[in-house]
Structures are given as C-alpha cells and as structure tokens.
Amino acid sequence: MPLPPPGPLARVLVTGASSGIGAAVARALAARGHPTTLVARRGDALADLAEELTRVSGLEAEVHPADLGTDAGLAEVRGLVDDERVVGLVNAAGFGVTGRVADLAGDDGQRAALDGLVRLNVLALHDLTVAAVGALVRRGGRGAVLNVSSITAFQPLPGAASYAASKAFVQSFSEAVHAELSGTDVTLTTVSPGLTRTGFADAADTDGFDRVPDLVVGAAEDVAEAGVAAMARGDRSVTPGLINQLSTLGGRFAPRSLLLPALDAGMRLLDD
C-alpha cells in the first residue's frame, strides 16, 4: 500500500480542489484521516472546504489559491510538493472545451480556451507529476500520485478533440511512469471516470449531460472513492462503473472506421 497510513505527517496535495472531483477527493482523503493541501484558483471556495475537512478529520487543511494555467501559479505549487509532509499528489485540475475545431479556430476567446486546456490538462499535470515523483523517490519512503484521466482517453472524440487528446496524454504518460516506478515504494494511479456531475459541463459550455440517461452519469463522490482506494493500493488505473469499463473496451478495440463516425454522430446530437 504505497500511500502511507493516515496521520498528521501523511499530507496529500490536491489540485482542482474547489469543486467537482477534486473537492470530492479531498473529502475522501480527510475521511480517512489524511491532512490535505488544497489548490485551486478560487480561494473562497477552498477556505470553505478546508473548514469542512478540519471538522471531519480534526487535522489542518491548508489552502493555497493558485492558477496552474500561469507560470507563476505552477511554480508556486511545484514548490509545495517539496514539503516533506507531502506523501501524495492528486492532479484533479482540468477543464474541457466542446465544439468543432474549425468553428472554434475563428473565435479568439475559444482559441485561447483551447490553448489554456492544453496548458492545464497536459503541461501543468506533467510538471507537477514529474516534481512529485522525483521528490517522493528521493526521500526513499512511500508515496503515491493520482492523476484524473477520463474514458475519453481511450479514443478520439470529435466535438471535444482537444479534451480527449489531453486525457489520452494523461493516461499514456501515467501508465508508463507507473511501470517505471516498479521496485520503488512510489506509485502512480489514474482514475478514468465517464460522465460525472461536476462543474465540467458549465465550464465546457454544454448542456449535453442533461440529454443522457441518469444511469450513465456518475457522482463525483463515487469517482473519488474509487480513485483514492486505488491510489492507496498502488493500482495502475481504475475506471469506476461497468458502463464506463465497457466504453473503454470499445474505445480501445473497435475499428476506428466504425467508431469515429458513430462518436461524431453522437456528439452532433448532443450539440443540437
């Protein structure tokens, strides 16, 4: 079990902690007795969550407002990883952009959003993962990293091309590093949720989640519990929910000549 037992010196740093899966992960860690360091842009939301977590665990939850989409914010959080109390990192910060690339390209705001997506979902996650893995291995003790991926990592997704590609990077990079860490007491786990009720839909400017059956939309709390449990075990990856697991199999093995037109048609229906 690479994640050390809960206690005052077993702190876990959680990015994207102000809402959604990140906040749910922080709650799951606090319920197990882990103090947390909470990172997100919205300091007020972090402060409210920190107060809640302290009531639950009796342990201090530290708050560090930072924008990981900026060089300054990323450098600040990278420095937090060097804290010797930090035995775990959860990269839950990220957002999505929906729409056809040809349509988005002509809008300066949307183009900037695509660039920001890659900067946060890929570059910031990569930077912090490298920093955490390096620090944890150097210390020689147990430690764990959890990266939030997505079932979109397992196939291209027309209508959300950049988002799916960013999660494909997260999945590939994380699984490779997990293998590299074999023989150490440090592990890297990915959790790959499907549609989950968080602030994602609002950030991506889509109401598509409201057009699919509740059966296929998960809860952030369930994703967090699955992710933290897998992180504690040192698993390579976990995909919560049978429907999501079947979807990843389809994404991996279905012929692209059949899969891509079907996905394209499905995304167009959600956009209509």
Image: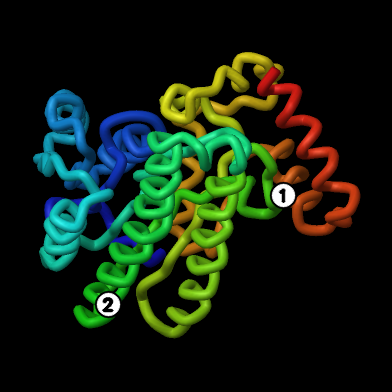
SS for tag 2?
A: helix
Q: How is the image coloured?
A: rainbow
Q: Residue at x 30, y 57 (%)?
A: 89
Q: Which mark is residue 38?
A: none
Left or right: 169 as drawn, with respect to 15: right
Up/down of 34 relative to 81, above or below: above
Asked if residue 203 can be seen in this view, the reply is yes
Give the side of residue 204 with respect to residue 164, left or right. left
Front residue of 250 and 121: 121
Using the image, tell me which numbered label, if any, was put on residue 248. Answer: 1
Q: Residue at x 69, y 51 (%)?
A: 156
Where in the figure is residue 60, as x and y percent of width and height? 9, 40
Do we see residue 10 in this rendering? no
Residue 138 x %, y %: 22, 82
To which quarter of the image does residue 175 belong? bottom right
Residue 119: horizontal and vertical position, in percent?
36, 54
Q: CA distance from mark 2 to mark 1?
A: 30 Å
Residue count near mark 2 (Cα–Cα under 10 Å), binned few <14, some 14–19, many ≥20: some
Name the residue tied to disc 2: 134
For this rendering, which residue is in front, 95 or 25?
95
